[in-house]
Amino acid sequence: MTDRRTALTESFMQDLIARTPRQPEFHQAVREVAHDVLTIEKNDPRLHAARVLDRLSEPDRIITFRVTWEDDSGAVQINRGWRVQTSNAIGPYKGGLRFHPTVNLSVLKFLGFEQVFKNALTGLPLGGAKGGADFDPKGRSEAEIMRFCHAFMAELCKYIGPDHDVPAGDINVGTREIGYLFGAYKKHKGQFHGALTGKGESFGGSALRVEATGYGLIYFLCHMLGVQGRSLHGVRVAISGAGNVATHAAEMALQEGAMVVSLSDSTGVLLAEDGLTQDHVDWVRAQKAAGQAIDDAPGGMRYVAGKAPWGAVDAEVLLPCATQNELDADALAAAIDAGAGIIAEGANMPLTADAVALADRKGLLHAPGKASNAGGVAISGLEMSQNAHGRYLSSVEVCRALRDIMGTIHDQIRAEAGSAARLDYRRGANIAGYRKVAQAVAAFGVI
């Protein structure tokens, strides 16, 4: 017989899909949360009457705009830009900007929805949002990227500000792009204030912002192992991706004594059966920063074209840090055969729904991105506080704060996640994040 959770979820999702057709990523994200929290909502008369999840699954507003700019040849180029402001129930909208040809409304709605719960888990007063454009920076000159950023911000600046909506970076939007975006914001608004995070330290950025998501992922993983009375020392860790999150996760994992056995990009995987060194990580980071391929691997690594890490090398811990839905059930089955027992997500929703179901059946410990990759937004929140008070923290202070925040997130989830024998981190994260936001939504009344 279908249990109550499943029946409630299916009824909720039928209505949502009918209202928002052709948005598969968004539906996937909402379904996962709905399955864990709808019984809680239905059992609380106040939350049930407020229809909290219905309200959170309908963004406060979606802003769509045209971005017109000139390339180096003088030809006019046109892209689409978006900002999805999902919920400001517990604070100003907060979430990254992504520049990638795969960006569309479904992806941004899923990311904004996830951001609501992720931000709630940090304990900081931050709402959830996401934005970006279908602009592909690959192969573009620095001057073209600058002109695109300036054109994008000429429109976005109308809808953001330090007490309203504070974007940050995401895929293909790093410190350089944030600099261009903030420069344009400052010019158009005539004000210097914390309307963006991820800024360079010379103009209001926080120490360790670039490292924060990857470092925080490892801090969270250490807490997961700590519940078992273990450390990362000697543990084999497979990581996907070669960007900031992946390389800084690898860096911190090495510092914690782990054996990191892979990094990857969209073209293939770098494998190191005996473990990467910091020199290897630095080489990958330098190659990607220069826009170069990683197929000419130095000694101690071998490159396999067209492959991902999962199952290609023995590893107990999987850290998917590339993009959404990168790890499907077949790949996870191969990774389990190669010894995987723990997953901590460095990307947002990197497992397909079938892979999540397989992880549940096999009893894997599985930390969702809204918990394990919350380090980036946590330090963005601290950057907002530093901007507001004009007092900037040292890297030591920021690192200490990041460790504390990731520990707090883990403790909140553990309180909701079931027995110590098999902590359900995914369910615990969904419930803990929902409880905080739901109380705020219900407190505001019908508005």
Image (tube, rainbow, N blue to C red):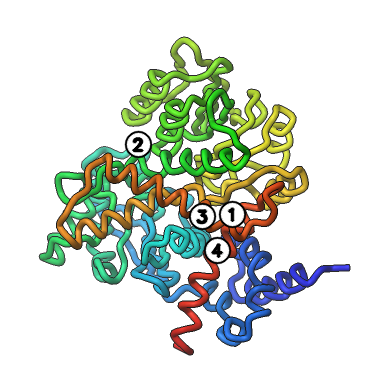
Left or right: 360, with 406 as reference point = right
**Residue in the picture at 65% in, 49% down:** 352
Crowding near the residue tagged with mark 3, few <14, some 14–19, many ≥20 C-alpha atoms within 10 Å: many
Q: Quadrant of residue 156?
A: bottom left
Amino acid type of the residue that numbered disc 1 sits on in the rendered structure = Arg
Q: Nearer the viewer, mark 2 or mark 4?
A: 4
Q: Nearer the viewer, mark 4 or mark 3?
A: 4
Sequence-wise, which precedes: disc 4 or disc 3? 3
The residue at the far bottom in this view is 446
Position of the C terminus by quadrant:
bottom left
Left or right: 118, with 143 as reference point = right
Q: Which residue is mark 1?
A: 414
Amino acid type of the residue that numbered disc 4 sits on in the rendered structure = Ala
Residue 78: image x %, image y %?
Answer: 33, 56
Residue 172: image x %, image y %?
Answer: 37, 44
Sequence-wise, which precedes: disc 2 or disc 1? 2
